[in-house]
């Protein structure tokens, strides 16, 4: 399995967008507010982009979805079922209160925890990491030892829970049950900031101390 993961950081919130490519087929994960670099990279690499994959419905993670979809005919937009209403509502996705009014197209497909998503020959398990948003998920590829956590788990931190429709208790429970149960050497690719590992966060993340 030839799996490549490339990250792009987009302003104004330093959001991480990932292009995950396996044997020439790609997905753009959480395309932010400056998607041009993602589109150009996929074209230069000759990737067939089949999916725009969303971890959760906040505006900075969906802002570029429409542009990426428009650039690749046949690409489909996939998001967590319980966050689908956020994609088309700038109040729910929290961009409206900041005066930005970000929306994206409605999803073509939705996922629930326990589902799997295919990117080329790679398989990604959908994990429940809701709490930062009502239905946020992470995508885990066991064969590659990688998990894309969106805004659930960061290096040394967790997603904000002092925002509408968030629950710290729910987020912490899901992190412990569904992320810290992964092997320690699993790479964590978060929605903001540097990558880390499950083992590092288990040992040192101050929000996860019992």
Image (cartoon, grey):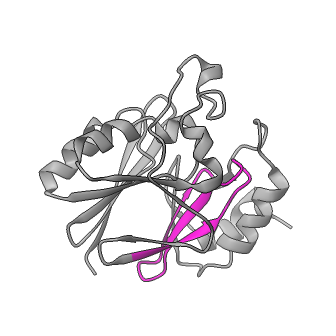
Picture coordinates of residue 95, whole percent (x, y) = 58, 27
Question: Residue at point 70% right, 57% down?
Answer: 130
The vertical placement of 76 against 204, above or below, is above
The vertical placement of 11 against 107, above or below, is above
Question: Residue at point 48% right, 40% down?
Answer: 62
Residue 84 as seen in the image, left or right of residue 65: right
**Snapshot quadrant of residue 202:** bottom right
Residue 20 as seen in the image, left or right of residue 23: right
Picture coordinates of residue 86, whole percent (x, y) = 60, 39
- Quarter of the picture containing the C terminus is bottom right
Number of numbered markers = 0
Picture coordinates of residue 175, whole percent (x, y) = 71, 65
Span colored in magenta: 123-151
The vertical placement of 11 against 120, above or below, is above
**Snapshot quadrant of residue 34:** top left
- Quarter of the picture containing the N terminus is bottom left
Question: Residue at point 54% right, 22% down?
Answer: 101
């Amino acid at each position: 399995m030839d799996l490549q993961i490339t990250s792009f950081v987009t302003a104004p919130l330093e959001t991480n967008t990932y292009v995950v490519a396996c044997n020439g087929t790609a997905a753009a994960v959480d395309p932010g507010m400056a998607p041009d670099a993602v589109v150009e990279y996929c074209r230069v690499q000759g990737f067939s982009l089949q999916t725009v994959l969303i971890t959760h419905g906040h505006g900075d993670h969906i802002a570029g979805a429409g542009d990426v979809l428009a650039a690749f005919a046949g690409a489909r937009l996939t998001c967590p079922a319980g966050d689908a209403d956020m994609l088309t509502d700038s109040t729910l996705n929290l961009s409206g209160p900041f005066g930005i009014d970000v929306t994206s197209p409605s999803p073509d497909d939705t996922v629930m925890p326990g589902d799997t998503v295919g990117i080329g020959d790679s398989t990604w398990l959908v994990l429940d990491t809701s709490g930062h948003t009502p239905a946020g998920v992470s995508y885990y590829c066991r064969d590659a030892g990688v998990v894309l956590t969106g805004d659930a788990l960061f290096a040394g931190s967790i997603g904000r829970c002092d925002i509408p429709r968030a629950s710290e208790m729910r987020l912490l429970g899901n992190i412990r049950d569904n992320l810290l149960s992964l092997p320690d050497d699993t790479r964590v690719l978060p929605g903001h900031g540097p990558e880390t590992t499950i083992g590092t966060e288990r040992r040192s993340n101050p929000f996860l101390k019992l």
